[in-house]
Structures are given as C-alpha cells and as structure tokens.
Image: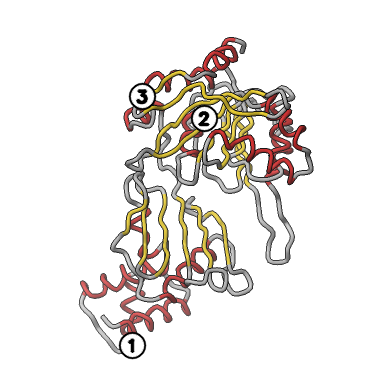
Amino acid sequence: MSTGLIDRVRTRLLIQHGDATPARVAAALRAEGLVLGDDAVLDLVRSLRQELVGAGPLEPLLLMVGATDVIVNGPRSVWVDRGAGLELTDVHFDSESDVRRLAQRMAASAGRRLDEAAASVDARLPSGVRLHAVIPPVSSDGTLISLRIPSRSAFTLDDLVVSGSLDDAAAALLRDMVGRRLALLISGGTGSGKTTVLSTLLGLVAPNERIVIVEDSTELAPAHRHVVRLQARVANIEGAGVVTVRDLVRQALRMRPDRLVVGEVRGAEVVDLLSALNTGHEGGAGTVHANSAGDVPARLEALGLTAGLDRHAVHALVGAGIDAVVHLGRDPTGRRVLAGVHVLERGPDGFVRTVPALVRTGTLFEPGIGMSRLQERLGGR
C-alpha cells in the first residue's frame, strides 16, 4: 500500500477527528475512490493506529517482558533495555520526520509542546511511561527519544534474590534496615535499578505506616496499602503554575508522613529532606545518581551548595541524617545488581565519607569494615 495513500487517509481522519476504526478507514478509502478487501483495510487500520495512538512502532518494544527503556537515536537506530543493557532492535522509521512527528504527538498527549520554541520535553505519558525528547537545534543529529517504562508489577526481595541481584543474607540485611527505620539513600548510575529497589524496600514498610512520596515524575510503585504521591509540575506555556520538588517536600512534611520519600534527589530539595531526617522523620528514603557509593557525599555536597548551604553544614546534615547508602550497579553481563551497602562516618575534618558494610565480590557478599557500625545502628533503633 503506497505511502501517499496512507498519508491521505491519515489526513482525512485527523480532519474529522476520528479514530482509526475499520469503518472510518473504509469510509476514507471510499472517499479516495478505492474499495479494498477486509484484510487490506485491517492492515491499514493497524498501520494508522500505530501512528495515531500510543507509541507507534515503538509500542511492541514497550510491551516486551522486562523492558525498562526504549531509546530512539534516529530512524534506523532504535534500542531497548530488557535488563542486560541496550540491544539494537529491527524496529525502524521511514524518515526523520516520522520520528519527529511521533515525539511531538507523544508530547502533546502529555499536555506539552515540542517545536523550535520548546526544543526539548520531559513528561509523563498517560500510560505512565516517562518521555524525554529533543529536536534540532538542541540535538544536532535529529530527533532523539528516550522512554522509561514503569515497572508493571512490584518486585519482592525474593524476586531480586532469584534474579541474582542479591543473595539471601543481603536481602535479610535490607529487610532489617527497613524494619528498624534506618534512613536510606539508594545510589547508582542511570538504569541501575534504583527505582525498582526503592519500590521493593518500601513494600516492606509496616502496613500501618503512611508513606508520602515526592517525585518529579511518578515512577515509584511500592506494594503498600497506604501510599500518597505528590508530583512536581513544570510551568505552563505562559510560564506560570510551576511546582518544584522542594515545594512538595515541604508540603509532605505537613501530611503526617511515617516515611518521607523523595524519588530522586537532584536539586535544592536535598536541604529539606536532610532537615526532615534530622528532626524526627526516621525511615525516610530517596535515590541519588552517583557512579559509586564513595561519590555520594560529594554529590550531596554539590546539591546542598546550590541551595545555599556551605560544605560543613551539608556534611553535618548528611552525617546525622543518613544511616546507610545502598549502591547499585551492573555486573559484567549487564545485569542490575546490589553492589554494596555503606555507612557514613565523619572524619576529623568534619566531612563525611562512606565506609563499606557489605561488599559484593563476584556473586558473593562479604562484611566490610563498616558492618559493626551498621549493626550498632540496627540495634539502636
């Protein structure tokens, strides 16, 4: 079936604001002076629905079992991550304009715009998928699309053990840390599984506790009966209506949280979270981007400095408010794994550093020099 015919039928449907149903497609074909058989009409319906609704040709990738990310670098460079790193797929677009049209349609479905005046977008689609897209001139190589797929089901610690992400001993330690209300930061690089692990740990919280989650874009989905969520909002086209994560952290503190959770700490909200953890809100948690557990104090310091705190103030809050860092990474096969658990201690210079309490060696976990300190904290809660 010619591209020209598909384009003309698509245009008729858009003008009529009609869905790509078999009846409407058949009517559009008759208006073009053509009568096709049922099979041809159904093929055209499938083609049009892929383009007019959902994620178009990317839809089958989003539905793949275990898929967490779909990346489009160009018409013939479409990748998927199913837990073992990015894989090149055989999905392709006919042209760069098709990629751009899909990105703009998905942005519009989230109430956002994507054009020369607003050349990038970061939004949550109605399906829950997180969209990031950029177009020229921001991206010199054409339209780029990144889709982050929310977990379709909550994982348990047993699931993570079976998958090889951790062993029984590490799972027992994490369970104890949550039960004893330790304040935790989940650290790791992009795609290391921070959101999955934090959701899993929140599912261990006692059912009579209230979890208040603050996120830039809704991703956490803990298996818990008392969860409330607050989501940040960007400014509208007129530049009004912005609600920051920091605003929401302050609101969350007035909502009687038993557990205050910040989905991703990446701005000035770090000050309010650390302040809360230092003023009686035990058991809070969040995630932070860091290449290693040792980089976490520096990362928090940088975020605190942007909020106006000096180095010593940031390290004082971190040392007193955070009990442990759970660091995630990938093994040589690309599988997401628990890399280790670390405690924080302040040195004689007043600055905080991480000390390994549980260390991964190959597929085994061994106690580190910080285990005794972690056990003290577990026994003291």
Q: Nearer the viewer, residue 213 or 318?
A: 318
Residue 288 as seen in the image, left or right of residue 302? left
Look at the image and tell me in which quarter the N terminus lies: bottom left
Three-letter amino acid code at disc 3?
A: Leu
Three-letter amino acid code at disc 2?
A: Val
Local crowd size for mark 2, using a 10 Å CA cut-off: few (<14), some (14–19), many (≥20):
many
Three-letter amino acid code at disc 1?
A: Glu
Residue 347: x and y, percent? Answer: 68, 24
Q: Examine the image and state in which quarter residue 42 appears.
A: bottom left
| Picture layout, residue 175 above or below residue 165 | above
Q: Which mark is residue 32?
A: 1
| Picture layout, residue 120 above or below residue 250 | below
What residue sits 36% from the left and 58% below the top? 79
Q: Nearer the viewer, mark 3 or mark 1?
A: 3
Q: Secondary structure at mark 2?
A: strand
Residue 138: x and y, percent? Answer: 57, 69
Residue 133: x and y, percent? Answer: 52, 63
Instruction: Give the residue number, with chain letter if any, for mark 2.
Output: 326
Q: Which mark is residue 364?
A: 3
What residue sits 73% from the left and 34% below the top? 314
